[in-house]
Amino acid sequence: MVNLQVREIAVIGSGTMGHGIAEVAAISGFSVHLNDLTLDILQRALNNIRWSLDNLHRKGQLKEEPSEVMSRISVTTSLEDAVKNADFIIEAVFEDFNVKSSIFRRISEYAPPHAILASNTSSIPISELASVTNRPDKVIGMHFFNPPVLMKLIEVVRGDRTSDETVNVTVELGRRLGKEPVVVNKDVPGFISNRVFMRLIEAACLMVTGNEATIEAIDSAARFKLGLPMGVFELIDFVGIDVVNSILKAMVNRGFRFSGCGLIDERVKEGKLGLKTGEGFYKYPEVGKYSRVNVPKEAGEGVNPVRLIALAVNEAAWLIRSNVASAVDVDTVTKLGFGFPKGLLEYADSYGIGGIMVELIKLKEKYGTIEVDPLIMQMVAEGNIGVKAGSGFHQYGGGGYETIKLTIEPPIAWITLNRPEKLNAINRKMISELMEVINRLEAEPFDRVRVIVIRGAGKAFSAGADLTMFSEEEPTEAYLTSRMLQELTNKLETLNRPVIAMIHGYALGGGLELALACDLRIASEDAVLGLPEVTLGLIPGSGGAKRLVRLIGLGKAKELILTGARLNAREAEELGIVNRVVPISELENETKAIALKLAEEPPITLMVAKGILNMTGEGSLEGVLTAESMGFGLLFSTKDSREGIKAFLEKRQPKYQGK
């Protein structure tokens, strides 16, 4: 239960990260107090914020006037003045423990007793910073990624004495800032992101210094074989070789085992620190101005991408086995924090865990300092080797489906309509496979699947029913097909857990009818929705007409169906057909965030609430009210209800089990 209401935020340090965090908070409506050593430094920060806001406004990404956002930011050189009225304080100075601990010691004296103290550190243990304060239970890590205005990820790091309430408030604040928080359950050096990143660097350095590949070859393989936005060494240049070196030393000093990287040490000694000095592993045409490095595709042909990611996967296995993070957490961090097109462990499952283990053994034989994590050995021994086996770090459903894919990433099950060459047109095989998988998911325990998301592969959600199916049917067969579709959509509507339709591209005819049977619909800006059957001499046959009337009323539903009109996403949102519209690049992350929010709630309560809400459009008021009272009384008998009330009284986050 989140009790603290955050209204005022203080940001300590106005450098690249500090002023970026302040900008994000002000955009989100918070009153922000920005602190630094001099007014000149603060004025530069304000200038940078204004420049960024003007750019966002010009591109249509900021609806509010920049001056209105700026009015919510005040600056001061007094640390006491910055924090004295703050509910939440974010320290964002450079990575030096002595500097950070001095600041934490002082702000714990000046800040109100209820205030939470967060650090944007990427490597220094939160527990060490908490130890110098008078409120270790209210100290937490809140690691933003650069640039904060654009990057969606935040690592929320729990210290040894951080309270559940502090974690919950920080996670909720992260969401209010428009970010996706990932909770790091234990205070380990480097958290999730830097532990994985440093292993990627370690493998790259070993392969270069071991004469297996050149720097250019490694980066070519990273870009063109793995599809990463930057090569490994290119990314080190971008971050700053000295910054990477500093983070690495802080981690090693606290027990992180690392083989070393002479390539980094050499460049630090030479003052070639990457983009910031104009030269690092590459030369840049202008100091401080990024220009994409020209790396030829053929340079990486001899590099094995499995070998390149093996140490990072091994580290991720340690994080999972040590209960620091889940596989989903690791993949979220690598996708949102580093721009991977798919998660690190999704790569591992695709290549095969057996292949990862083979490369780890080879690296150990050649370089001697590597141990294969027991979790990887266990997975291989049990046959959980990835996609081909149906399970690895993630579950891949199996079942030999031809027209759909099922991926279970607890607590979410993803159903992908998988006829991209036909824009996911619905045929009889898809209907039967969807019914089979939905029945299967209905029986899954709540601790494994709490929310189901339906999405489409390729360029569309679903363009509707496969017309070739109907062209071959007699009237009685068409009737039976319609009844099959109705049975499917009715099953979705009455399923015992929430179902979300993640819509992009076309959602037409039967495709939209499928989406209308879901509880929520999240659409990308490129979505096109409609029930155009009348233009083919047909009518909606999967229950879509009734469900559309429920959503938008009889008059408007008649207009859309009788004219066969197609709506863009914003028009559909205005009518209430979709719940939310987001840019295509944010569709999966936004859908996932909503699904995870639903998964936090008691599943039996959601099931009962969903059933009663579905009844509101049917039957008499008295009948609905009676059902509501019965549901209300029934829920008092559940363990989840007792847990919710107990957690509220104890001021902690409830742990619902679906019982």
Image: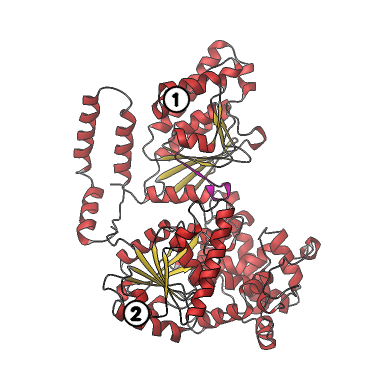
The boundaries of the magenta stretch are 579-587
Q: In which quarter of the image is the N terminus?
A: bottom left
Disc 1 or 2, which lies upstream in sequence?
A: 2
- Residue 81 appearing in the image: yes
Please, is residue 35 above or below residue 415 in the view? Answer: below
Compared across the picture, whether 40 is left or right of 87 comes to right
Q: Name the residue under label 1.
A: 487
Compared across the picture, whether 558 is left or right of 137 comes to right
Q: Residue at x 43, y 48 (%)?
A: 594
At label 1, the amino acid type is Glu
Mark 2 nearby-residue class (10 Å; few <14, some 14–19, many ≥20): some
Residue located farthest toward the top when viewing the structure as drawn: 475
User: Dot 2 lies on which element?
Assistant: helix
Q: Residue at x 37, y 73 (%)?
A: 159
Compared across the picture, whether 195 is left or right of 112 comes to right
Mark 1 nearby-residue class (10 Å; few <14, some 14–19, many ≥20): some
Residue 657, horizontal then vertical, whole percent: 31, 51
Tag of residue 439? none
At label 2, the amino acid type is Glu
Task: Confirm or deny contact between disc 1 and disc 2 (CB under 8 A).
Answer: no
Tag of residue 80? 2
- Residue 94 appearing in the image: no
Residue 104, horizontal then vertical, whole percent: 37, 80
